[in-house]
Image (tube, rainbow, N blue to C red):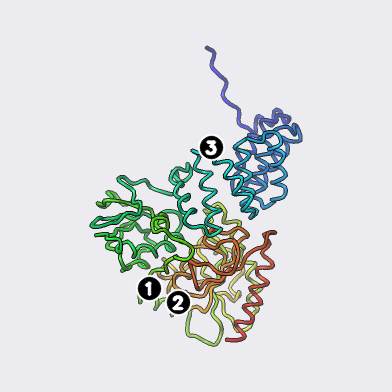
Amino acid sequence: MAPQPAPQPIEFRLAGDPADTEGWIIRSKLLNRPGLRDLAAASSRRALLLDPSQGAAWAERAFALTHCGRHAEALHAIGRALALDPADPGVLFRLTVALQRRGDFPACRTALDRLIHLQPDFPSHRWGRAQVRLHEGEYEEGFADYECRYWLDEYQQQAYRPHQGPRWTGQPLDGKIIMVTTEQGFGDTIMMARYLPLLKGLGARRVVVERAEELRRLFDGMAGVDAFVPRDVAPTPIYHVHSSIMSLPHRFGTTADTVPPPPRLTIPEEARAKAARLLGPRDDRFRVGIVWSGNQGFNDNHIRAAGLDRFLPLLSVPNTAFHSLQKGPPEAELQALGPDTPITALGPEMQDFADTAAVLEELDLVIMTDSSVAHLAGSLGVPVWNLVQHVPYWVYGRTGPTTPWYPSMRLYRQGPDEDWAPVFEAVRGDLERLAAGR
């Protein structure tokens, strides 16, 4: 049997034949990832100019446009793909993504139900339905669907370390040791820590909790927890049952009316002394903390983050003093403004969440786009104005200025056009009134 030729790199293949429709579709699929969606959309368009009957090209174009916020164009592309094959599960899946990102949840739910009927064993469809249900406050059904995440490919690869032994399913814990593991981001862990003290009430003999080093001081001495262990510790401590911390709302049967209050967090005195030194003596100005970006490793951070430039007009509000709590690469945006910018950079001084908590305690208000600091401020009861994208994290629901998870949080929402300008205009007006009345 003659040896098969090695596959050609896609760019080389297209350079040799720019009329290769399949090549442009493959290129679009390869580029359909964060930061490259515009290129993916352009590649699928090249394929469609060559052959508009290519349903795969319409589907890839729709997926790319959805993640670029071009929802009307995305739905048009999906319509063209469905016209070619009305029962293609891949196209239907892209339809659900487009409808969810647009905020059309009734239509999204209908499409998801159809997908689940066609492919009942695909966890991604139940995962999509979980997001819709949780956004709409249907917590019991939503958290039940949320459990399907264990079978998502990307989840198994990145988000969760599998543990041996039986998973806790909500039964009484009489005399048992339960191991609670963490997943997803720091904000999720801080938010769900409210359930840890409740486990003793179900009869647990010992509650052992996995914890990242960044949360060590903040969680020290938490009520109802017998021991914390570092994440990815080996060997795993002895336990009878285990549970992810993100499964606890489901196991406790949480509804929108029964969300428990945040737990008491620990702020060490040395952290408080450090915060006092960093902020200096109080004067009559309104102390405002700002954060403009979350973890840049999060796929949708480019949607939820607004950039420091959006916050700069707030600096002219009289009787205010601004302090940056930003951490990570986005700190460079503040450094680029130079030393005369009237924003105190506290990010480099905060080594863990206990340091951040101590600073938050000294502020009058935090204005920010969504990140772990929002969950920390909300858990501490610090007033926080959380500026969220049109379809935000499910915790914030779809409408209204409040969330049952954080009574001290006020939500400012983008409209369907996903424009930040009206959000910051509203924030500036409210801040002017608040600072003037101080």
Q: Is residue 175 above or below residue 217?
A: above
Helix, strand or loop for disc 3: loop
Residue 186 location in percent, x, y?
Answer: 44, 60
Q: Is residue 230 above or below residue 59?
A: below
Residue 239 in the figure: left or right of residue 373: left
Query: Which callout, 2 or 3, points to the residue nearer the camera?
Result: 3
Which mark is on residue 361?
2
The answer to which of 360 and 107 lies nearer the viewer is 107
- Tag 2 or tag 1, which sits nearer the N-term? 1
Number of other residues with Cα within 10 Å of mark 2, as a class: few under 14, some 14 to 19, many 20 or more? some
Which residue bears the numbered disc 1?
A: 267
State the SS at label 1: loop
In the image, residue 31 sits, relative to residue 345, either above or below, namely above
Circle 3: residue type = Gln
Q: Which residue is drawn at 46% across and 47% down?
A: 149
Q: Give the Cα separation between the discs numbered 3 and 1.
A: 49 Å
Q: Which amino acid does label 1 sit on?
A: Ile
Q: Where is residue 426 in the image (x, y as percent from the top left)?
A: 66, 72
What residue is drawn where x is 69% and y is 28%? 16
Image quarter where the C terminus lies is bottom right
